[in-house]
Amino acid sequence: MSCNQKEKPKQRGDGPREIYEYPTDREFKMQTGELIKLETTDLNFKQITNRISSFQEETYGQLKVEFVDEKLKKRVLPYVYDEGLIKQKNVLRIKSDSILIDDGYSINKLKRILKRHYLNKGEIPYYSDSPRKALVEVTLDTSKNGKELKALLTTLTRTFDEIKEEINDTIELRVFFDYLRQTSTPMPPKMNEEE
């Protein structure tokens, strides 16, 4: 091995050095809050979503999901739909690997669509009114685990960070968690053969 190819000695604490919060304008009290580490949790997406407090509860805003993205530790304060009124056009829906707007897009088109969603300013009627009102909804199958949620949130936060850096503005990423509440359709009543 030449002098230029020496391996760097491993340092203690080679883990993530910076913590990114989404959104950045909310306070999170670590003393009372719950932190779900997506790499190690046994909870599925439904269980994680059901733990998020409603706006009316005292514990609202005290749960965050955390994951490591290369040298960054990222924490997302997820929201759930509650009693507030949210215009549907202000919500960009992402379901697993698809973006549900227009005729639908692959997650590979996320940067272009997310940027349009945040910077639309009411021009296209079915995109967000303003960056301040823009929201992103993440929907996964209820059985998906923390690692699968981490993969989607990593893609979303990386893309959001790129856009934020490009436009040099103080936009915020607000993420709603939702799952399809599958209700079974009741069976039609059996007809008597005599009728």
Image (spheres, rainbow, N blue to C red):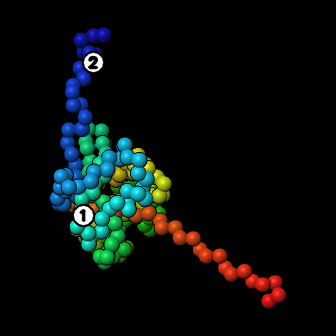
Residue identified by numbered label 1: 59
Q: Find the distance from the CA under tag 2 to the CA under tag 1.
A: 48 Å
Crowding near the residue tagged with mark 1, few <14, some 14–19, many ≥20 C-alpha atoms within 10 Å: some
Dot 2: element: loop
Instruction: Give the vertical position of 145 relative to 117 (above or below).
Output: above
Q: Residue at point 22% right, 67% down?
A: 58
**Amino acid at the residue labelled 2:** Glu
CB under 8 Å between callouts 2 and 1? no
**Amino acid at the residue labelled 1:** Thr
The percent position of residue 159, horizontal first and vertical second, equals: 32, 51
Residue identified by numbered label 2: 7
Instruction: Give the vertical position of 39 relative to 118 (above or below).
Output: above
The percent position of residue 77, horizontal first and vertical second, equals: 27, 58
Compared across the picture, whether 29 is left or right of 115 comes to: left
**Disc on the earlier residue, 2 or 1:** 2
Q: Residue at point 46% right, 52% down?
A: 144
Q: Residue at point 24% right, 38% down?
A: 16
Q: Which mark is residue 161?
A: none
Q: Note whether residue 194 is visible.
A: yes
Quarter the C terminus occupies: bottom right
Q: Residue at point 21% right, 31% down?
A: 13
The percent position of residue 55, horizontal first and vertical second, equals: 26, 70
